[in-house]
Structure formats: structure tokens, C-alpha cells
């Protein structure tokens, strides 16, 4: 799997982050982040709580503002220009830890909202697209229900389908399985693996190391706002270089 | 045969009435009902005894006799020869008028201040907090007095508009702001139906035109939805809607020859036009700004009750902030905003009874004030007052609850 995955990575650059810095007030959250992501690459970002990994991926679609350095997504420079932000957000999908489905809309309406209002898709067509992706995440029969009627795993899969309806070229995942019961984690990870196999460019903040081994072609370890170490999964897990990474891995793999 | 699931058949003991969950609530209700009925019975017999000893009786005959007092602001024809019942109706209409006006302005003010209190602009945010904290923390009675005092002390009297060198002048020669109130031009139709210039038929027709415009605009919105569903692109409805609202009523007014009766100074006071009395203005403004501050807090709470994650998820999908507000945040915020809004409307209606301090003739001032004092029918008047406020409050609350259940979200 890992070998096959690497073949799909192209030379085309999807995301390029250079010398990016971010502060919350006086607190320096991200320090000199340099990161280049190629099209088709799957990256898993891990690290202790508060290391800035969520903040990093939230900067990529401008949910958080960065103060210094540059972020370029598909050749579009992320600036305060609303046009650029709109362009980037329509190409980058995102899934959250707490799903953030719209509770007042049905599953189908959740999926068609953005295509209708952002992509100006006719309703019928938007519903066809939505059903296509709901089938892909294996819950087409829940289309007319409300998010509150679904289990956590189902909700997260709807959230993935909702993002896919916008036909993104890049997907960001912010701890997608952290709020789920153990038996629901698998159904969400399976969906993500399927997505990876289709060649989607993915950045995933997660502590699912099995997922990282199976899917990622690069694992990034962050601590105190810095990228401490990055490597291919085998090398990363079997032969971590920095002492901080070794400590982290021994703690999460130790039990 | 007895199975394990059969309940144990214990014999009934008297203590179970209080200790057993099956009987406890019923016991308590019976006790409460007995206490309530005996308290009411005691009060009634007390009232009957005292009335008998004082040689009084309960009778509503006074409503038919002549009231014998004047009212400065009336919506229907009234003079001192009219009956007490008609005076009460004048009061009811005045109460409804000020309550209705205050509900509308308080809602506009409240929504405005509530949304702006969440603004990113520091100055705007602080100004709105200042407004909210100042107005909701000082009793409304004091606000009524303050506004009324400012109006009577600062505004010029009608005599200052007189003479060769008047110290005050009319605003654009149309409006006169005096310490007795505001005089505005009154519209009338020169070629109206029904002969007389002030015929109510013309106004009903004007209203009908506006209602027709309303349905026209609704139709256009529905059509826009259909077009959007079919093609994906929502047609711009702003100009067509403006035209639908403005054109018919303008044509209507032109045909019927709309004209304005402009107030002019006659002797010691202004004549013509419409007089909006100072007390009404003071009461209306005070109720609006006071209740508006509470509504602002309800609106802010409603918007903040929608989690940040909702806005983020919508933003991440590329939805623009204005649409995020109307498609995602507001539908969820309204269910938090509407129930306390009902209480605020009820508060406005009941607080309007403070009208008496500035001499505005609402129901409390007419029926509960002058009529009560002149006829001495205290019990009857207060009973009628209570009944009136109860009916109005229940009506508002029912109407708003219907609206609330139509806005309530289905989530499962």
C-alpha cells in the first residue's frame, strides 16, 4: 500500500507554506513553519496537545489568520483579499473534530447548502451530487434525517460527504476521530482510506497511528509550534531522530 | 402463577399517600386545591360581608353613564358627555397604540444594538454595551419622567413661534416641535371616494393596495426560489421588490389626489395637521429604549448560543459571511431569541400603564383613574382592568407562541 501510494504523488505543488508565523496575542503559536505538499500526498500531523497542529491546518483555509510568512494553495496566495480566500476555501474541504453539521438542516440539505449558494448549482443537480457522495460514505438511506438522529460515526461521514460535494482538491481533517466511540472510529477511517486511495491530497491531524502507517506518505511531528521532525511512516515510527519525538512515540505507542 | 416480574402486592398503608411516588403527587395536588379553594372562599365572603356592611353592591351600571371628563389624546370621537364605557375604549385604544408602537421600535432598536454589540469594531461594541447597561439598569418610570421633562423644558412653547421675530420655527415649515407635542402634516385625499375628505374608505383601499403589494413581493420571492432551484442562479429581487412596493401605492395616491394638511399657528396654539401629544411621545420613547436594551441582550444571547463551529464549518465550505448569518446562524438563533421576546412584548404592554405619570390617557388612567375616582366603583374598575390586561397579554403570548412554533427547528 505504502509503495503504491507514493507512485500517485505528482510533482505539482498543492500547498506551499514558507516561514509562516502566528501569534495569539503575545503567545507564539506557530514558528517559522515551512511545508510543501504535493498533489496526491497524504500527510499525517501529530504532536502533543497545544503544539499548534490544529492551528496550522486551520491557517491553510484562513479559519485562522497568520501574521508572517506566506501560504500558497494551488498557486493562490492566501492574503486578506476576500477573493483569494473564497477561491481557496472552495478548493479546500475540511472536517472537524465535532463534525459541525448544521442541526436545523437534513443530511441532504447539509450537503446541498454550499453547492447551491456558493457553486450556484441547480437544486436538482446538487441533490444528485449529494446522493452520490452519501452513497460513497455508505449512508444514502439517512438523507432525509436530521444530524441529531445519527450516530457520531455517521455524522462524521456526512461531514466528509458535505465537504466532498464542493469537489475539493485538498481535504483537511482536524482530529476527525477524537470525539468518537472506538467502534465508530473504524467506519470513519475506512472512508478516509478510500478517499486516500482515490488520490485525494490530504492533511490529517490525528493520533491514529495505524492510519498513519497505512495511508500516509509523510508523518509530521510538531511540538511547541515547530515542525520537529518529518519522515516517511516506516522511518518515522521505527527510527525517530529527535528525543522529543522518541518520548512522544513511546508514550502513545507504549500502552 | 406468579412470575418474578409481578409487582409485590403490599397492603395499602396511609403513609403511602405521602411516601409512595404513585400517590404522592396526587395527594399534594388535592391538599393544594383545598388550600386554594378555602383561601378564595374566605376572600369572597370577606368582600361580601364588607360590602354589605358598607351598604355597597357590585354593579357595572356606571359604564353607561356620562363620563364627564375630557381626554387630550383620543383615537375615536369622544367628549365629556360620552359614557364611561367609551372613555374606557379610548383608554384601551391608547394603550394598544403606545404598546404597538413601542414593540416595533424596541424590536428594531434591540436587534440593531444586539448585533452591533458583537461587532468587531471596538468603539461600536462599547457604545452598544453602554446603551444596554445604562437603559436597562435604570427603572423605566424614571426614563419616562426624564424624557418627558426634557421635552417640556427644552422644546419651545407655541407662543415662541408667534410674532415678527419668533424664537422658534417649524422644521421645513412642515413639522412643529413644541413642548405640548409634535404637530405633523396630515394626509387627506382631494378626489377620494365617499364624498368627505376624511372618509375611512380611502384608507382601507390604500391598505388593500399595500396588502396586494405584500403578496406580490411574496410571489416574486417564491419565483426567485424556483429560478434558483432550476438554474442555480438567484435573480436579483431588490429592484422588482422596490417597484412592487412603491409603484402601486404612488399611482393610487396620484389618482385620489393625496394632499397634506399642514399645521399652522392659530391664536395660542397650532391647528390642522396631526398632533402627537408630548406624553405619548415620552412614554413611547421611554418604553422603546428601555425594552430595546433588554431585547438587545436577548438577540446577543441568541446569536452567541450558536456555536462557533457552525460559523467555521460554513466558512470552510466557502459560504460568505452574510449568507452564513442568514442560512446557518439566524435560523438557529431565532429559537433562542423568540421566547424571551414574548416576555418583553408583555412587559411593554404592562409597563405602558405607567402612562399615568405623564398624563397619557391609557386604560389605567381613564377606567382605573378618573372613572374609578369619580364613580367610586373601585372593585368593578380594577376587575375590568385586570381582565383587559390579562386578555391582551394572553393574546400577545398566544400569537407569539404560534410564531415560535412555526420558527422552531425540527432537529429529529
Image: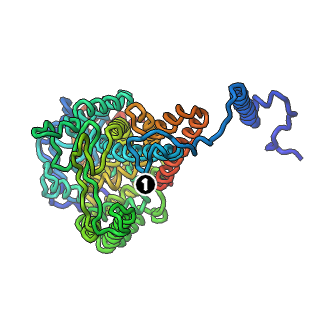
Residue B147: horizontal and vertical position, in percent? 30, 32
Does residue B36 sit above or below B196 in this rendering?
above
Picture quadrant of residue B240: bottom left
Query: Relative to B204, is B190 on the left or the right?
Result: left
Q: Residue at x 22, y 50 (%)?
A: A61
Residue B366: horizontal and vertical position, in percent? 48, 38
Does residue B329 sit above or below B378 in this rendering?
below
Q: Nearer the viewer, residue B276 or B314?
A: B276
Q: Residue at x 46, y 43 (%)?
A: B80
Picture quadrant of residue A38: bottom left
The colour scheme used here is rainbow
Quarter in which the C terminus of chain A is drawn:
top left
Residue B201: horizontal and vertical position, in percent? 39, 65
Picture quadrant of residue B377: top right
Residue A209 in view (yes/no): no
> Disc count in the image?
1
Quarter in which the N terminus of chain A is drawn:
bottom left
Q: Secondary structure at mark 1?
A: loop
Q: Which residue is mark 1?
A: A104
Does residue B218 sit above or below A205 in this rendering?
below
Query: Relative to B34, is B150 on the left or the right?
Result: left
Q: Residue at x 15, y 49 (%)?
A: B172
Crowd around label 1: few <14 · some 14–19 · many ≥20 (10 Å): many
Q: Nearer the viewer, residue B368 or B234?
A: B368
Residue B151 in view (yes/no): yes
Query: Relative to B60, is A8 on the left or the right?
Result: left
Residue A219: horizontal and vertical position, in percent? 26, 46
Chain of the residue where label 1 is placed in the rendered structure: A
Q: Nearer the viewer, residue B331 or B123?
A: B123
Amino acid at each position: 500500500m505504502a509503495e503504491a501510494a507514493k507512485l500517485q504523488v505528482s510533482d505539482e505543488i498543492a500547498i506551499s507554506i514558507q516561514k509562516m508565523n502566528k501569534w495569539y496575542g503575545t503567545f507564539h503559536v506557530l514558528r517559522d513553519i515551512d511545508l510543501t505538499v504535493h498533489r496526491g500526498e497524504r500527510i499525517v500531523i501529530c504532536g502533543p496537545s497545544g503544539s499548534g497542529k490544529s492551528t496550522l491546518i486551520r491557517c491553510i483555509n484562513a479559519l485562522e489568520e497568520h501574521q508572517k510568512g506566506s501560504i500558497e494553495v494551488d498557486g493562490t496566495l492566501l492574503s486578506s483579499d476576500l477573493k483569494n480566500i473564497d477561491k481557496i476555501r472552495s478548493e479546500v474541504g475540511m472536517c472537524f473534530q465535532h463534525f459541525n453539521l448544521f442541526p436545523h438542516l437534513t443530511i441532504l440539505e447539509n450537503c446541498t447548502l454550499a453547492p447551491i449558494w456558493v457553486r450556484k448549482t441547480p437544486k436538482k443537480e446538487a441533490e444528485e451530487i449529494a446522493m452520490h457522495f452519501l452513497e460513497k460514505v455508505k449512508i444514502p438511506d439517512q438523507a432525509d434525517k436530521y444530524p441529531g438522529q445519527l450516530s457520531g460515526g455517521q455524522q462524521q461521514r456526512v461531514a466528509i460527504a458535505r465537504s466532498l460535494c464542493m469537489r475539493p482538491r485538498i481535504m483537511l481533517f482536524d482530529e476527525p476521530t477524537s470525539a468518537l466511540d472506538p467502534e465508530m472510529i473504524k467506519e470513519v477511517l475506512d472512508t478516509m482510506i478510500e478517499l486516500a486511495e482515490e488520490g485525494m491530497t490530504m492533511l490529517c491531524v490525528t493520533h491514529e497511528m495505524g492510519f498513519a502507517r497505512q495511508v500516509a506518505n509523510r508523518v509530521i511531528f510538531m511540538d511547541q509550534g515547530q515542525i520537529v521532525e518529518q519522515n516517511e511512516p516506516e522511518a518515522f515510527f521505527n527510527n525517530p531522530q529527535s528525543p522529543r519525538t522518541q518520548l512522544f512515540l513511546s508514550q502513545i505507542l507504549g500502552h | 402463577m406468579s412470575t418474578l416480574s409481578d409487582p409485590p402486592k403490599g397492603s395499602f398503608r396511609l403513609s403511602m399517600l405521602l411516601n409512595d411516588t404513585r400517590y404522592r403527587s396526587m395527594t399534594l395536588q388535592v391538599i393544594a386545591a383545598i388550600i386554594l379553594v378555602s383561601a378564595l372562599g374566605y376572600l369572597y365572603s370577606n368582600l361580601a360581608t364588607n360590602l354589605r356592611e358598607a351598604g355597597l353592591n357590585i354593579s357595572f351600571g356606571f359604564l353607561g353613564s356620562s363620563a364627564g371628563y375630557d381626554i387630550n389624546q383620543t383615537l375615536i370621537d369622544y367628549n365629556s358627555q360620552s359614557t364611561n364605557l367609551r372613555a374606557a375604549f379610548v383608554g384601551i385604544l391608547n394603550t394598544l397604540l403606545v404598546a404597538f408602537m413601542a414593540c416595533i421600535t424596541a424590536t428594531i432598536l434591540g436587534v440593531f444594538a444586539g448585533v452591533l454589540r458583537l461587532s468587531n469594531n471596538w468603539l461600536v461594541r462599547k457604545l452598544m454595551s453602554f446603551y444596554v447597561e445604562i437603559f436597562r439598569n435604570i427603572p423605566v418610570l424614571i426614563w419616562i419622567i426624564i424624557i418627558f421633562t426634557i421635552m417640556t423644558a427644552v422644546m419651545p412653547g407655541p407662543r415662541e413661534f408667534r410674532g415678527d421675530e419668533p424664537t422658534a420655527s417649524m422644521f421645513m415649515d412642515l413639522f412643529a416641535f413644541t413642548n405640548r407635542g409634535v404637530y405633523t402634516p396630515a394626509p387627506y385625499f382631494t378626489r377620494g371616494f365617499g364624498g368627505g375628505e376624511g372618509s375611512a374608505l380611502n384608507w382601507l383601499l390604500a391598505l388593500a393596495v399595500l396588502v396586494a403589494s405584500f403578496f406580490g413581493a411574496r410571489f416574486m420571492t417564491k419565483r426567485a426560489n424556483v429560478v434558483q432551484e432550476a438554474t442555480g442562479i438567484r435573480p436579483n429581487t431588490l429592484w422588482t421588490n422596490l417597484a412592487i412596493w412603491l409603484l402601486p401605492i404612488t399611482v393610487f395616491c396620484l389618482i385620489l389626489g393625496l394632499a397634506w394638511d399642514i399645521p399652522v399657528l392659530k391664536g395660542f396654539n397650532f391647528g390642522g395637521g396631526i398632533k402627537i401629544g408630548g406624553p405619548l411621545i415620552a412614554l413611547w420613547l421611554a418604553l422603546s429604549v428601555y425594552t430595546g436594551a433588554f431585547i438587545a441582550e436577548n438577540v446577543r444571547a441568541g446569536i452567541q448560543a450558536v456555536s462557533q463551529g457552525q460559523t467555521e464549518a460554513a466558512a470552510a465550505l466557502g459560504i460568505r459571511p452574510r449568507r452564513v448569518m442568514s442560512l446557518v446562524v439566524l435560523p438557529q438563533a431565532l429559537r433562542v431569541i423568540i421566547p424571551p421576546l414574548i416576555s418583553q412584548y408583555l412587559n411593554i404592554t404592562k409597563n405602558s400603564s405607567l402612562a399615568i405619570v405623564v398624563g397619557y390617557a391609557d386604560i389605567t388612567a381613564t377606567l382605573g383613574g378618573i372613572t374609578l375616582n369619580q364613580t367610586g366603583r373601585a372593585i368593578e374598575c380594577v376587575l375590568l382592568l385586570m381582565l383587559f390586561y390579562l386578555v391582551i397579554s394572553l393574546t400577545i403570548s398566544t400569537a407569539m407562541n404560534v410564531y415560535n412554533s412555526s420558527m422552531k427547528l425540527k432537529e429529529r
